[in-house]
Image (cartoon, helix red, strand yellow):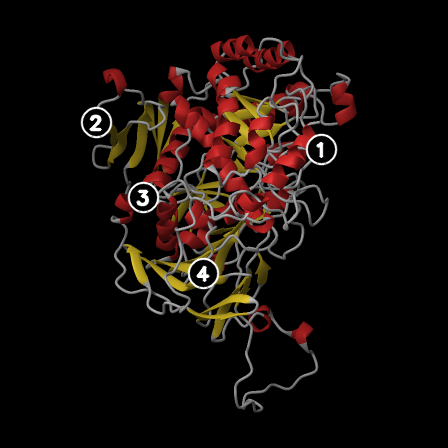
Amino acid sequence: MQRRKFINTVSALSGMMLMPPAFAEQGTASADTPVSDPQQVHPGIWKFTFGTPENITPQSTRLIAPDAASLQHLPGVKDCPVTVTSDINERGVIISMPLQPNEYLYGLGLQFQSFQQRGLKKKLRVNADPVIDSGDSHAPVPFFVSTGGYGVLVDTARYATFYMGNKKKQPANAAKPDNAKEGTAGWNGLNKEDRYGLGDDSAILVEVPVAKGVDVYIFGGPTLLNAVQRYNLFSGGGVVPPRWGLGFWYRVESNLTQEEVKGMGNYFRNSKIPCDVLGLEPHWQTHSYSCSYVWSSNFPDPAQMLADLKDNHFRVNLWEHAFVHPTAPFYDALIPYSGDYLVWDGLVPDFLQKEGRNIFGAFHKKEHVDIGVSGYKADECDNSDFTRNWSFPELSRFPSGADGEQMHSLFGLRYQDTLLNVFNQKGVPTYGLVRSSGALAAPYPFVLYSDLYNHRTFIHAIAQSGFTGLLWTPEVRDASSNEDLIRRLQSVIFSPLAMVNAWYLKNAPWKQIEREANNKGQFAEGWQQLEAQCRAIIELRMSLIPYLHAAFVRYKKEGIPPFRALVMDYPSDEAVRDISNQFLVGDSMLAAPVVEGEKMRKIYLPEGEWFHFWSYQRYSGKKEYEIEVPLEEIPVFIKSGTILPLAKATLHTADPDSYQLTAWVFGNNIQPATLYESDEQLNPTLVKVELLWAAAAKKGSIKRSGVAKGGVNQYSVVEWKRVGG
């Protein structure tokens, strides 16, 4: 009956589906003639308009405005740093930009299989299984940056193809070039520089299919990092998670009951293992594929469970996806605001329409958030048509006027809008997970993850995601050995969201890594030692929260990614241009995660002087080192001149003792460390706190700019420790 009602309603609405959406007037040109001169839209940002851009794009559907005020504070750029031309033909729009010799390119979203993009071809498609280097991604973003000191955003929701140089067009008067080389090695014998044309004059070509026009935004530098900052602030500025979101997360086995979930919380508290967030996986619902969003019989009194967990200082995050099962109470109301194809027999909401977002969000607010849910894990909002074939087809149509291709490109973003608005209405902050995102995503409090599980790829993604306003967690699910579990846990604590996802393990993985034995309650011999090792790693994460929180505040205010590749800060250092297995955390910390089986680790340290976090050994920069990596240590280095505030490791971030700091002072020429005291509200009041070091007196002090909430200061330094001074 529900299916028949859905089909009849769609038939009646077929004309409305082709009508222009409410945002049709945005992002369009006044004529089909390409606009050749760029328009400056913000300081250091220019827009080229070619032809008549489509109505549905990332820019035209965005709901968060640029941070115009913060853009005013970036370094000035007088002229547009790159020239863009276009050709509009039967294939769509072809955009061209010059590319200088030895100019390196980065970005295009969450690209698992490559880092430096020059010389590569990428077709940006949303795909849940991006296992080859084609451009498929959980979060493809049509934005890239250059070591030439600029960034480019192609404002399209189409599956655009980016040719990142190395495509040579035959000249009008073709002739054998004077510098033609002889040899028998052929293509396979070329080195990387010749194969990708890194030293040649070239061009970036972008083909946007179907469209009859497009807007292209240019972000000036003058440095690569400045261009990234400008893009993030144009997106609305980075997100500042609540402190509990930066704590440790644990997702429980999917079939646990209400009492068993509370029991898992008690296990963490009794075992003195820090944890701030418990996640519930699919079976908290009466139906999960597609979703009913209704509490199952495993949770007879969810409000009481949430209250009990809150008393124990736990937040709760719910798994879901956006495909709405017929048993969902708002199914009928959503039918007019959904696409013409089903997924797992569920409606596909048109999140480009306010009505669809409101219907979906209103139920979530009433049944989840109003009784204490703190966030969501928005799963499967990417597209698996290319591999497992479960999502809606690209030929789908939606009431907003979007087709399936456009909706796939925007679905994850507008899903985030829908969920974020629920918490905005409630007046509380959130932090959660999402499996698909895209352009202009920096302001959203959602962190990407994947069902893939290659550890090296997961480490790479921490560095790679920072070019395009994305956050990524290399979540821990299972392990092939105790060593693998430790190394994965070490990696995840140096990421935007530190989480173990034990959705198919009834007991913590450190008790037993073998799935079948774990679920039978058969614990490994000597598991307590592994638990202690994992506890120490999680405690390290808790000690880093003040430093991480400050890095996220800078992300919000200045657009500087809290986790970023070395090339962002050191673009002129050729040695860092291909390094994605180590990255910067904030301004002063370098992390180099280790994978199972590695006893030695090659690490490159950029210019300056660095200190090993564990041994305090001093290292000179602009050098590569091969160091031993004991199992209990992840290689971390602190830049000389840093005051590193490490907090007391508490069981949760609500403990007032979590504001007690030990200030570590590394090297000479010490710079102030800036922290922020927050009232943890939706739009938090932030009090700036500076840690200062007087070299002559060999003494530290605290300086505050403002008054904390209630006049009570939060941070205090209980000890100052000197390293290498």
Q: CA distance from mark 4 to mark 1?
A: 51 Å
Location of mark 1 (residue): 481
Q: Residue at x 60, y 48 (%)?
A: 404
Looking at the picture, which amino acid does disc 3 mark? Asp
Residue 149 placement, left or right of 591: left
Q: Secondary structure at mark 1?
A: loop
Frontmost of labels 3 and 1 is 3
Location of mark 2 (residue): 706
Q: Give me the disc on residue 214.
A: 4
Mark 4, Cα crowd under 10 Å, few <14 / some 14-19 / many 20+, is many
The disc, 3 or 4, on the residue closer to the chain's N-terminal end is 3
Location of mark 3 (residue): 67
Looking at the picture, which amino acid does disc 2 mark? Gly
- The foreground one among 552 and 12 is 12
Looking at the picture, which amino acid does disc 4 mark? Val
- The foreground one among 619 and 296 is 296
Mark 1, Cα crowd under 10 Å, few <14 / some 14-19 / many 20+, is few
- The foreground one among 583 and 299 is 299
Q: Whole-percent x and y of residue 184?
A: 70, 82
Q: CA distance from mark 1 to mark 2?
A: 50 Å
Q: CA distance from mark 3 to mark 1?
A: 46 Å
Looking at the picture, which amino acid does disc 1 mark? Ser
Q: Whole-percent x and y of residue 137?
A: 59, 49
